[in-house]
Amino acid sequence: MPLTADLTSADLNEIRQSALGAADPLGVAADLAHSAEAGRLADPQDAGLALSLAAEIAESRSKFDAAQRYADAAVTAYGDRDDSPAAAARALRARILYRSGRADEANALVEPLRPLLTRYPDAAAYVTAALAVGGRARDAERWLTEAVQAVVAERGVTEPADADDAGVLFFLLQQRHRLRHALGLQHDTHDNLAERLETRLANANSGAAAAPATDLVFWPRAEFDRLAERTDAYGATWDEHRASLEQELVRQTAAGRTGLALLPGSVDALTAQAGIGGDPVSPENRAGYARALATGTARIAWPPERNGACWCGSGLKYKKCCLPRSRG
């Protein structure tokens, strides 16, 4: 599909959800790379994100030469940035190098990321995946164990009061727990803690003070129009859908919740969640899809600046678009 000019962060998140279901995903990857290189992004700072996404799409189709070009360009675009997206891009580049049989180069790229796990735990999934592809899953488990131990030592406690308080520790525990399960390792105290915190988070999210994940799934305009042919569960119109989300986010803010974000949805992914013969728009499938989105990395941070681009991807300023919808 041809991409429009001035792609926003919301556009890129939508593409991340839908690209693999597109008729020509490699064409989408090439268009993303061209948009980044030609300055066709609403925010030039998103160049690294667009190129990383192109690399992941090409990698998923085993087009490793193209994936490597895009990943190299993503790392270059991030330059000296010392943040989570930049760390994830370097880990992605290492993963593709491993897949291409260039282990020495990959090792040299991934090793400096080891001390960053406690600073950017959301990039830990990329580091873990890179090491696993390189046949170093046990190294990844050791790195995550050391990161967990470092955070526990820094906090001076072995068990936070709840999952929200756990923060960095909770994310690292989740990554480590999943990896150890994949390796078939016996549960240890950190695995048990990960399960306890996951249970507490699930219980907290089922309470009245927190909305279920389904209340935070955002359907970009094109996806909403497709979905509206089958259900009005997310609103009768796109305006109603956006207003409902804005009002829910404001409600959660008033309840004291922070770090809120929207979960961009894809009709193709919702359909795939249902499986053959399943009903994609059944309440059970929609809830399961929302839970899957909530554990992923595709998120639209909320709220944006008043004069910044609106979170819905309309291209309008937030104060002129979805901000007033909270008063409905």
Image (cartoon, rainbow, N blue to C red):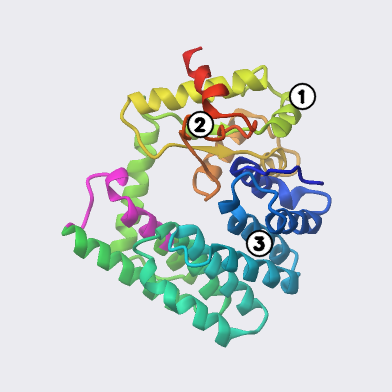
Q: Is residue 17 above or below residue 92?
A: above
Asked whether the beta carbons under mark 2 and mark 3 sit within 8 Å of each other, the answer is: no
Locate residue 222, reporting x and y percent: 73, 33
Mark 2, other Cα within 10 Å: few <14 / some 14–19 / many ≥20:
few
Locate residue 284, reporting x and y percent: 58, 33
Compared across the picture, whether 193 is left or right of 90 comes to left
Which three-letter amino acid code belongs to the residue tagged 2? Asn
Which three-letter amino acid code belongs to the residue tagged 1? Glu
Compared across the picture, whether 258 is left or right of 47 comes to left
User: Which residue: 36% across, 42% down?
Assistant: 201
- If you read the primary sequence from the N terminus, does the residue marked by circle 2 or circle 1 appear first? 1
Element assignment for label 2? loop
Compared across the picture, whether 49 is left or right of 259 comes to right
| Marks 2/3: CA–CA distance | 32 Å
Instruction: Between residue 291 and residue 220, name the one nearer to us.
Output: 220
Residue 56: give its label: 3
Residue 229: give its label: 1
Residue beneath label 2, please?
307
Q: Is residue 325 above or below residue 305?
A: above
Mark 3, other Cα within 10 Å: few <14 / some 14–19 / many ≥20:
many
The verdict on residue 148 being magenta is no
Which three-letter amino acid code belongs to the residue tagged 3? Glu
User: Which residue: 76% across, 49% down?
Assistant: 21
Stretch in magenta = 157-175
Mark 1, other Cα within 10 Å: few <14 / some 14–19 / many ≥20:
few
The verdict on residue 171 being magenta is yes
User: Which residue: 59% across, 63% down?
Assistant: 77
- If you read the primary sequence from the N terminus, does the residue marked by circle 2 or circle 3 appear first? 3
